[in-house]
Structures are given as structure tokens and as C-alpha cells.
Image: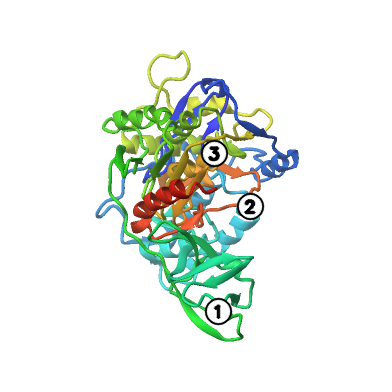
Amino acid sequence: MTIRRACAIVFLVAVSGCMLMPIMPRGVLAAESGILRILKPEAREEFERLLYRYDSSWDEPYSATLFYSRPGPGSVPRIISKDQARNDVDFLFGVLKYGYAGYQFFGGDDGFLAAKQGIVADIDAIRGANVMSSQFAAILQRRLGFIQDGHFSIAGRTMCSRYRPFARFDMEFDKRDGRFYARRTPDLWVAAVEGEDPSRWMKMSLGSDGEVLYCLGTLSDAHRDICVKLEWSDGSFEFVWLNVVDSAIIEGPVYQLKHMEGIPVVVTRFLMPLPDTMAELDALVRDAAELREAPAVILDLRSNGGGSDWYPLEWVRRFAGVDLYPASFDAQLVTSTAAKMLQNTASSLGAELPAVEDSAGSADVQSWLAGMADPDRPGWGRVSAAQSVRAENDTLLVVLIDSYIYSAGESFVGFLRQVDDVVFVGTNTYGAMLAGNVGVCLLPNSRLELSCGSLISLGEDLCNYDGRGHTPDFWVRPDEALERAVKYIQTVRADGRER
């Protein structure tokens, strides 16, 4: 997500396709405004209660101990002593307290102390004086499994439960008078699915001809296909298998503009500004204003691995012609721990951080964060509260999404949801939005990698959608999404129907 504040524009970098995130002043955006909706005051109060209160920092880890180097063959010792493991545990929980923005969200001192005690008990229960690093990593991952955060990882593993789409696309339904009629048996409608109202299981989809229809579907963290009981209006029933909707990662360009059947198709798979991507990302943003003159556009975000929130925000702003933003709250940790871990991230990518305001040369992260500090809330920057701003739009924009869209790619989807006449086709996104501005460090003895976000971002409902992501308007297999989007646009044009 993007933090907005009235200071200099700076950039924070994150590893592994996470966010390269701008902290930018509101004044640099366009002067025109969209349709404003005011945030509820009680929502801000509740958000602030999710920020850990630092009464002192006497137990904060020394910055010098927060080192990082990219893991490689032989970098992790095979075995460490139990004492070394216990020292790593103490270090880990000190880092989480001062470097992880989701610390209070996931239980604060009480929740994390219980996890720590469980980890120590598991170490003590191991026979002998040593513990294998792989075994130690498994203990940490299991005991911290309550952290439902798509960016949070230990030893390269994210513990966030993934909710995948399960569907049955070969059973097609039409909705008439509030009932779902099977196309194969037009006189029968679905009375119940798993004893529930069918509307809970029916998802809008697109047929091969672009026509709108319905299919059975659900999001689930199940590890295998799901069997559901389908009850018909004539009293009969059958059991139907819903299959996981899987797809391969789609390789592609940072930016490409092409045409299919005369429809502009914008493709972007990566939003990270690097020396060899900057020109393409600039072109992505530059072309957005012209696209709004087209009657319909397809934006292909499938498998977009993230990068910088600035590019999607600016693309949507130029396409819509107004400032817009979803209702949201952000707060950035400004502790020494958060600064050092973010610096580790930037250094590992070889990124040079820009200067702060009028200073000469590049600046370190600590200098950036110091300027954000909230004097009334030690350890945190000032809370950023963005009012919901929507934009009217006359161009039909069809956005293709899949479960490999991550981090800043998901921010793109979130921004687009503030624009009228935008529909999303495909499957749900990955779900890594809660804690950005990801920092890294290694545990000192086991050399296991810790990766966690120092920025907490939530919508007005304060719900965590990590692992679930953004869901589509039309459920379609990702590998069929482009062709069906083209057919859908042609069908809408031909019929002149409300979309």
C-alpha cells in the first residue's frame, strides 16, 4: 500500500516481489477530485488500537545484530546447540516486537509470549544437546502459524493459509427470477447446495461466447477437491465435485500494449522500478490517459509479482482523470529495528535510496523514518487515513487477474475497484496486503531468514484479506480469461446491455 504524508517523496524497497513503496505527498497528485466518502471516526480509533504501544525500548535488539546476506548453499548450519536455538528464539521475538507491524494485530505480547513458550518447550523436548536447523525452522513455522500474513516468512516459508478457488465450469446455470436453472435441464433449478441457499455457491462466469452465466464455486483452504451435495427443485439430488482452479505462472513483459479484435490490451507482469524496467514502467503510466478515450480496454495483470504501488496508483489516476483511493489506514514502524531491516532489503537489491528533501546525496532508511515519527506514539509514524474516493468512467475496463498477483499487483486491483465500469475476470489474487515495506534479517546462530513487514495497511472494515486476496466478478480459468474477455466486450457492444 502507499503511505501519503506531507513530506518528501521517498522509496522503500522489499524483497521477493514484495513492495517497492512510495511515501508521497498528497500535493503531487492531480488537482481534480473524485467522489469522496468520509471515513468513520470509530474505524480510525479501532485501527490505532491495533498498533503496539511502546512504553520504552530498553529491550530492542541492537541494530548491529540485525545482519543479512542472501541465503545460499552451506549458509545455514546443519546443527546448532539447544542454547544457540534458545538465544535465536530470544532474538527473534525481540525483532518481531520492534520490527513487525502486525505484532499487536496478531495478539501482541500475550499471543507472541505464548508462542515463544511453546517453541522453548519444543526445543527442550528434543533429545540430546543439539537441534537440527531444519527441525528448528519447522518448530518456528508451526508455532507462528497463527500469523495470517502473505509477506511474513521464516526460512523462506510463508505460513499464511491460502484460500484457493474451487469450481465446476462444465455445469452452467442461468439466473431467472432469483433461481438458478441448469442449462442442461432448463426446467430444473437448484434448491440448495450443502443445505444452504444456492446463491452462496453460485459465481458469475463467462461462457466461451462471452455470455454471462453462473457456475458452482467457492474459496477454500482445502488441500483436495471438494464434494458438495446439490439438491434440485424436483426433490432429487446429486453429489458434485468442485475442482481446484489451477494455472501456471504467466511469463511476460514489464509492459506491452497490443490489440486483439481492435481492443487495446495492456499487459504488465512486474512493477518493480529497476534500471532495466524504468523505461517500460514510465511508458505504462504515460499511455494510460490515451486509453480512456477507447470504448473498451483489457488490462492483463495476471501473474503480476508486485513492485511499487506508485505505478498502479498513477496509472489509475491518469486513466480515470481524477485522484482516487480506497478507504484505508496505514501506519509505519519507525523503530531502529524496522529501519535496519529495511536497509537490509535495499542493500540486498543493490538499490540506492534517494536523498531526503534538500540534503545532498542518498539517505539511509533511518533518516527517512525519523521524519515520519509521531511524537504522541513512540515507535510509529503518523497514522495515514485515506478517505474513499471513487471515479466515474465511461470506458469498459476488463481486468484479468489470477492467484499469482501479489503485493503491489494487488494494490493495482484495489485502486481499480474505485473506478466505475471496471470488471475483474479470472480467479482471486494471492493475498499479501496486510504488512508491507518488508525488511529482512538472519537469526544469529541458525542463520534462518526472517522476512516481515514494517507497514500495516487495512481497509475501513479492518479485515485481513491475506491468503484470500481480491476476488473476481467473473470466475474464469486464467488461461481462458483473455479470450473470454474479448468475447464479453464484443457481446456487450453488440447487445448494448448494461454491464
Q: Secondary structure at mark 1?
A: strand
Toward which corner of the image does residue 211 lie, by quadrant?
bottom left
Against 443, residue 278 (above or below) is above
At x 39%, y 43%, the residue is 298
Label 1 vs 3, first from the N-terminus: 1
The amino acid type of the residue labelled 2 equals Asp
Of labels 2 and 3, the one closer to you = 3
Toward which corner of the image does residue 189 lie, by quadrant?
bottom right
Label 2 vs 1, first from the N-terminus: 2
- Mark 2, residues whose alpha carbon is within 10 Å: few (<14), some, or many (≥20)? some
Q: Mark 1 = which residue?
A: 230
Q: Secondary structure at mark 2?
A: helix
Against 108, residue 381 (above or below) is above
Of labels 2 and 1, the one closer to you = 1
In-front residue for pair 95/259: 259
- Given contact means CB atoms under 8 Å apart, are the residues at marks 2 and 3 in contact? no
Q: Mark 2 = which residue?
A: 109
